[in-house]
Amino acid sequence: MTDTAPRPTETAPATISHWIGGVSTPGTSGRSARVYNPATGQVQGLVDLASVEEINAAVEGATAAAKKWRLVPLSKRAEIMFRFRALLDAQRDDLARILTREHGKVHGDALGEIARGIENVDFACGIPNLLKGGYSEGASTGVDVYSIQQPLGVVAGITPFNFPAMVPLWMIANALACGNAFILKPSEKDPSASLFLAELLKQAGLPDGVFTVIHGDKVAVDAILEHPGVAAVSFVGSTPIARYIYQKGTKNGKRVQALGGAKNHMLVLPDADVNMAADAAVSAAYGSAGERCMSISVVLAVGEVGDELVNAISSRLPALKVGPGSDPQNEMGPLISREHRDKVAGYIGGAEAQGATVVVDGRKQNFESDGFFLGVSLLDHVKEDMDAYKDEIFGPVLCVVRVPSYEEGLRLINENEYGNGTAIFTRDGGAARQFQFECQVGMVGVNVPIPVPVAYYSFGGWKASLFGDTHMYGPDGIKFYTRSKVITSRWPDPSSSRIDLGFPQNK
């Protein structure tokens, strides 16, 4: 439920407004939500929550802008993307500080997020090549056939709190480069990064109205999904909401790609380099406080590797530095909210009550701040019927499941409702090749714990991790934000023209 708050007074935190028509635009709904600094637990802003009327007005403005933007030559669009990329690169430290202040992640992690986002802008800079169609001369006598890709018009993105810069860039770069107007509805928990991106796009020369930021809660989401002027919606978030977005959006005739949750497994075979596997597990489980859909949340330890691997992982945890992201010495920051912190902590006690062994208990770590901190936790002897195994915890909790064989580990991966990412650690090339063929998961790492594809491939899982037919960014992103048109042309000698009611034939 949205943490609603009264309108700000003279002593209240500053208001975070919408971005409409190329300018900061205060909300008119009379509703707002608190934005916290997760490291201190203090309210640092109030973000406007849009009404249906505000969404309608934003779509109307974007529709007018889209009609002009689609006429801008590809070379000009690419030029704007290049300038946007240069501005992002030059000001990445400033953007990273915004991420640390509102999300809580440490500065280095924030910079990593921005770097991966910039890769998507790099890809979009090649839009003149990416939108090349096909041409068949002489498909029939005097007839040529060719295909072109055209923008959809107004498209929207609904993005999560955990990557407030990178995930919007997954969508924005390709959508704009393809000639669409884009409406972004970021998470109300950390909304300021979206406004920073809006300012940079304006500086890069993007015409006013082509990029819009509307803050909001479910009211705004439903208004976007129901508005006939929005042709397509991209979403990243939890599986229940992804399913809802997909069903409601497609019911209203929209093209929808909705990425859901995950429960990523890392299969460690007995022949693996245990130290490398332990380093990978710690990095992938606790980075960004575990609040990322590609985190490793389950290690499947095969056979006799279990004891050695658990010891190797647990021995690394005391050295991890957890604290405010503003301190460059810290490696992990707080969770996004107090409620989420408490929910994650509940899984630790729940797992212990259900029979798991709590090797390292993050609840016992003390912090000076009133922020939303939780230390890292390691659970051993987790079983597949435990809540800590079944649910997406989305926090710094790593579960170890002991399995007797490769086949049993593969079964657990393939029977899991999610199919986002997975990894295998082994020295056996044959086993790795078999695994990548047999696992029913969209993104696979071989001795790589977080197999996020580079920007010129596409990101997305299988099963309950994806609703829709296309993955995010890369080639699938270009396909999602355009529709193809095939033209059949003929320029015959007028003297050969005649009436023919028969079925067209290629002769």
Image (cartoon, rainbow, N blue to C red):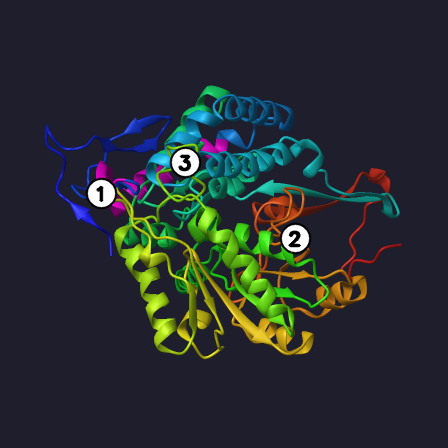
- Mark 2 or mark 3, earlier in chain: 3
Say whether marks 1 and 2 touch (CB < 8 Å): no
Tell me: residue 65, above or below residue 190: above
Task: Report which residue position mark 3 lands on.
Answer: 62
Q: Which residue is mark 2?
A: 448
Secondary structure under tag 2 reads loop
How crowded pointer 1 is (Cα within 10 Å; few <14, some 14-19, many 20+) is rated as: many
| Front position among marks 3 and 1 | 1
Asked whether residue 64 is drawn in magenta, I would say yes
The residue lying toward the viewer, choosing from 189 and 347, is: 347
Q: Which residues are magenta?
A: 40-67
Tell me if 394 is positioned left or right of 174 in this view: left
State how far apart marks 1 and 2 are (Cα): 38 Å
Indicate the position of residue 82 as horizontal and vertical percent values.
Answer: 59, 24
What separation in Å lies between label 2 and label 3 (alpha carbons)? 41 Å
Residue 305, quarter of the rendered image: bottom right
- Most distant residue in the left direction: 10
Q: Tell me the tag on residue 34.
A: 1
**Residue at left offset 51%, top offset 42%:** 171
Q: Can residue 291 be seen in the rendering of this structure?
A: no
Using the rendered image of the protein, determine whether residue 112 is visible from the camera's viewpoint.
yes
Seen from the viewer's position, the closer of residues 9 and 367 is 367
- Label 3 element class: helix
26 lies above or below 233: above
Tell me the amino acid under the disc marked 2: Val
Q: Quadrant of residue 362?
A: bottom left
Identify the residue shown where x is 61% and y is 41%: 150
Front-lying residue, 352 or 78: 352
